[in-house]
């Protein structure tokens, strides 16, 4: 028997070098289980439509279940002369149960709609794994933020100390980023979770299939109605990779924060030894290499999104072999991002916060200049621009905050700039001595006062619970479809 069950149109077999060039069989191990499941569902539908009889569907499902078991036990060896996973599985079924029955499993279906089903099933599985990993990291950051409300530190713009803030405030910003990414995944998930099966090669089929049945058994939300769109459009892959790259952008910047803060120049935090390496020659070195590799890993994820765009952009409407190169890009991006999240979770779980060094940085660099300027605006009705000038002049020669809050110096500068004599309260200097009290004066929504940070944490947790509920509904739908599918398989096999 000719092992290449598809190549009947051509007289000669594929050149071995050509086969090696364009075979995706090795990469297809990533979607092998999804291909088996999609085939089972398609053939159950064919049986329920009267296209396969009871004996045929029994033998087909028994053979496919055997293959699925091999895969789950890591015993399925993908070798041979097939171009990809689809003929490989079909050939295995034919070899086991014969061409008379095995040759019917592909009725009313094409590799084109088949691979689209496989990828959509796989991507939604990976998106759920990603969601779970992000929620675990969220919990770690949330707990750390709740414990860091009193840990004051500078907030930075242009990598210069800008305003007084807290470590909790930074962590809350990271939590907001994670929530945005969870929302993006939720929206993306439902665009992914649509059924292309039944579109055949590109123009549908004359076989009496039931697309709603395969949609139900696979747990899809609905069908992709237009058969051309179902097999041709690959925007769902680019959108997936773009979503992953947006997460990578956030995490790369977080890694950069941690790298800077762990350096001796900042010395705000210490990364646990298990996430660091050492120098081969300098005995004193402790290098935060994990964070550096997170940055480069994020760059790879960004590059993969761009690569996918360059593959897709020049392909006319229809299905083309170029698309097979999108599979390893997807796989690598998901795998890499999941590892990065795991590393960040470990780093934050073991992070040592050097509170004294953070406070020392706050006490230097005139970080309360804006607070004092706003005090003058609010209590003496000075134009902000004049208050700004007053503090700017004082800051030129001031190295510590206590110089800025020197009552006599400030009154003299007010007189010099405004030509007005203003008498500051006798306890003026004590108003700005305690940074924590200064933060409590920040009454704007979302500021780093303890009241606002606590409220921010409350809002964040509420939204997180909403995302958990939506995530649970996604999982429940898949589990329901899987239970229905498995029950139907057992019922048919045992009938």
Image: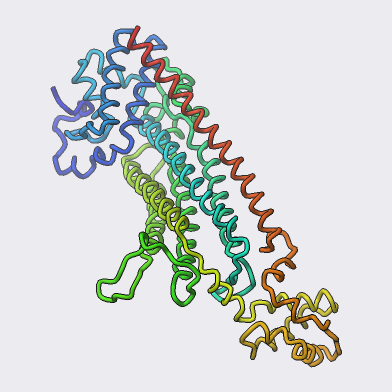
Number of marks in picture: 0
**Quarter assignment of residue 322:** top left
Residue at image position (22%, 24%) is 92
Could one spot residue 367 in this view of the protein? Answer: yes
Give above or below for 182 relative to 452. Answer: above
Side of 276 where 223 appears, left or right: right
Q: Nearer the viewer, residue 262 or 335?
A: 262
Give above or below for 349 relative to 400. Answer: above
**Quarter assignment of residue 423:** bottom right
Give above or below for 148 relative to 418. Answer: above
Give above or below for 291 relative to 383. Answer: above
Residue at image position (53%, 74%) is 357
Measured from the top left, where is residue 14 in percent x and y?
16, 36
Measured from the top left, where is residue 394 in percent x and y?
69, 88
Quadrant in the picture for the C terminus? top left
Q: Nearer the viewer, residue 317 or 159?
A: 159
Q: What colour scheme governs how the chains and residues are painted in the rendered image of this protein?
A: rainbow
Residue at image position (58%, 60%) is 148
Q: Nearer the viewer, residue 228 or 335?
A: 335
Measured from the top left, where is residue 468 in percent x and y?
56, 39
Side of 483 where 385 appears, left or right: right
Could one spot residue 310 in this view of the protein? Answer: no
Quadrant in the picture for the N terminus? top left
Measured from the top left, where is residue 282 in percent x and y?
29, 76
């Amino acid at each position: 028997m000719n092992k290449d069950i598809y190549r009947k149109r051509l007289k000669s077999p594929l050149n071995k070098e050509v086969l090696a060039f364009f075979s995706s069989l090795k990469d297809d191990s990533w979607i092998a289980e999804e291909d088996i499941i999609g085939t089972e569902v398609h053939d159950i539908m064919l049986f329920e439509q009267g296209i396969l009889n009871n004996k045929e569907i029994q033998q087909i499902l028994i053979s496919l279940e055997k293959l699925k078991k091999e895969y789950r036990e890591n015993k399925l060896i993908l070798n041979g002369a097939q171009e990809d996973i689809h003929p490989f599985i079909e050939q295995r079924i034919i070899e086991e149960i014969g061409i008379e029955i095995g040759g019917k499993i592909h009725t009313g279906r094409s590799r084109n709609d088949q691979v689209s089903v496989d990828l959509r099933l796989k991507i939604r599985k990976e998106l759920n794994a990603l969601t779970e990993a992000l929620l675990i990291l969220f919990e770690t950051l949330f707990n750390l933020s709740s414990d860091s409300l009193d840990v004051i530190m500078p907030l930075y713009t242009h990598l210069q100390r800008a305003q007084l803030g807290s470590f909790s405030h930074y962590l809350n910003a990271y939590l907001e980023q994670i929530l945005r990414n969870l929302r993006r995944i939720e929206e993306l998930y439902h665009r992914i979770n649509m059924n292309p099966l039944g579109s055949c090669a590109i123009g549908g089929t004359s076989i009496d299939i039931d697309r709603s049945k395969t949609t139900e058994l696979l747990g899809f939300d609905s069908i992709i109605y237009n058969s051309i769109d179902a097999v041709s459009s690959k925007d769902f892959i680019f959108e997936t990779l773009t979503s992953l790259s947006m997460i990578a952008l956030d995490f790369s910047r977080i890694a950069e924060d941690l790298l800077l803060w762990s350096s001796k120049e900042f010395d705000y935090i210490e990364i646990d030894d298990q996430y660091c390496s050492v120098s081969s020659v300098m005995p004193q070195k402790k290098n935060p290499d994990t964070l550096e590799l997170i940055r480069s890993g994020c760059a790879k994820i960004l590059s993969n999104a761009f690569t996918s765009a360059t593959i897709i952009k020049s392909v006319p409407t229809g299905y083309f072999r170029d698309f097979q190169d999108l599979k390893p890009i997807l796989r690598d991006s998901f795998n890499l991002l999941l590892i990065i999240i795991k590393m960040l979770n470990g780093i934050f779980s073991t992070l040592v916060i050097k509170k004294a060094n953070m406070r020392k940085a706050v006490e230097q660099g005139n970080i309360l200049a804006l607070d004092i300027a706003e005090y003058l605006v609010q209590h003496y009705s000075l134009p902000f621009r004049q208050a700004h000038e007053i503090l700017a002049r004082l800051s030129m020669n001031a190295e510590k905050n206590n110089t800025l809050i020197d009552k006599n110096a400030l009154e003299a500068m007010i007189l010099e700039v405004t030509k007005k004599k203003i008498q500051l309260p006798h306890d003026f200097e004590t108003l700005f001595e305690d940074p924590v009290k200064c933060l409590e004066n920040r009454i704007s929504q979302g500021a780093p006062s303890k009241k606002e940070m606590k409220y921010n944490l409350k809002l964040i947790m509420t939204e997180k619970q909403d995302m958990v509920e939506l995530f649970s509904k996604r999982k429940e739908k898949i589990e329901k479809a899987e239970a229905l599918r498995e029950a139907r398989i057992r019922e048919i096999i045992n009938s």
